[in-house]
Image (cartoon, rainbow, N blue to C red):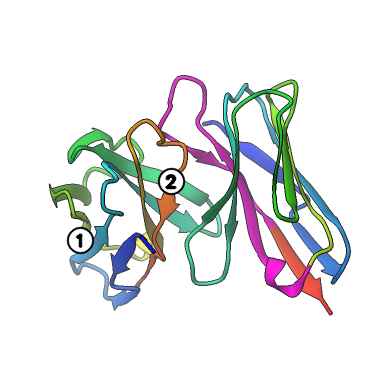
Amino acid sequence: DARVTQTPRDKVTEMGQEVTMRCQPILGHNTVFWYRQTMMQGLELLAYFRNRAPLDDSGMPKDRFSAEMPDATLATLKIQPSEPRDSAVYFCASARSGSTDTQYFGPGTRLTVL
Amino acid sequence: GQQLNQSPQSMFIQEGEDVSMNCTSSSIFNTWLWYKQEPGEGPVLLIALYKAGELTSNGRLTAQFGITRKDSFLNISASIPSDVGIYFCAGPPTGTASKLTFGTGTRLQVTL
């Protein structure tokens, strides 16, 4: 049963600390998405990659957020320095090229910045 | 930016009842997707629609792609307790095949 995995599931940190979230896409999926979910804004797309190359990160605050795919099995989302307003659930999703409307989501990382 | 409005915002129904919810957009979509999210989990794709007027079923769920291409509907028949969750519509705005915009969600509660 292929699934997207994300670590950690929960993260509590203090303002100013660096946070790194990790995602393992489904094997064979070459498109990876990062989303953020909050009560106020709902689900928002932050960035996405195809074949490990960033295609669009216009939804991401550039000054403190960065997203990378060091290899085809790992995507990372880093926040440095973190702020309380970054508290949210961050989801990773993956899809096959040519079927990127059908995205499979991971369980999310719940981030709390104190 | 693009917004998808869902209604109702929340529903409290009794087990066995049928459920209807809808999603509207101010612009045309070429694909409509319906996702369900349970507490502590990511959204799970339920149904995908690709053609105006299309009606697609997945078990007790039926979704329709509105003929104006600016709306979509999801029906759940004979609801059961495990239908509880938040239902989201989503779609890629025209010209952005990979970028999904998500709706505001309909929260469904089912009582015994």
The one nearer the camera, B30 or A114, is B30
Seen at 55% across and 55% down, the residue is: A40
**Residue B86 falls within the magenta-colored stretch:** yes
Going by the numbered disc 2, the residue's amino acid type is Gln
Q: Position of residue B91 (x, y in %)?
A: 55, 35
Q: Which residues are magenta?
A: B80-106
Left-right relation of B94 to A50: right
Q: Residues within 10 Å of mark 2 (few under 14, many from 20)?
A: many
Q: Position of residue A78 (x, y in %)?
A: 21, 57
Seen at 47% across and 56% down, the residue is: A37
Q: Earlier in the sequence, mark 1 or mark 2?
A: 1
Q: Residues within 10 Å of mark 1 (few under 14, many from 20)?
A: some
- Mark 1 or 2, which is nearer the eye? 2
The one nearer the camera, A102 or A43, is A102
**Which image quarter holds the C terminus of chain A?**
bottom left
Secondary structure under the numbered disc 2 in the rendered image: loop
Going by the numbered disc 1, the residue's amino acid type is Pro
Secondary structure under the numbered disc 1 in the rendered image: loop
Disc 1 marks which residue? A81
Quarter of the view holding residue A100: top left
- Same subunit under labels 1 and 2? yes
Quarter of the view holding residue B64: top right
Left-right relation of A87 to B33: left
Disc 2 marks which residue? A103
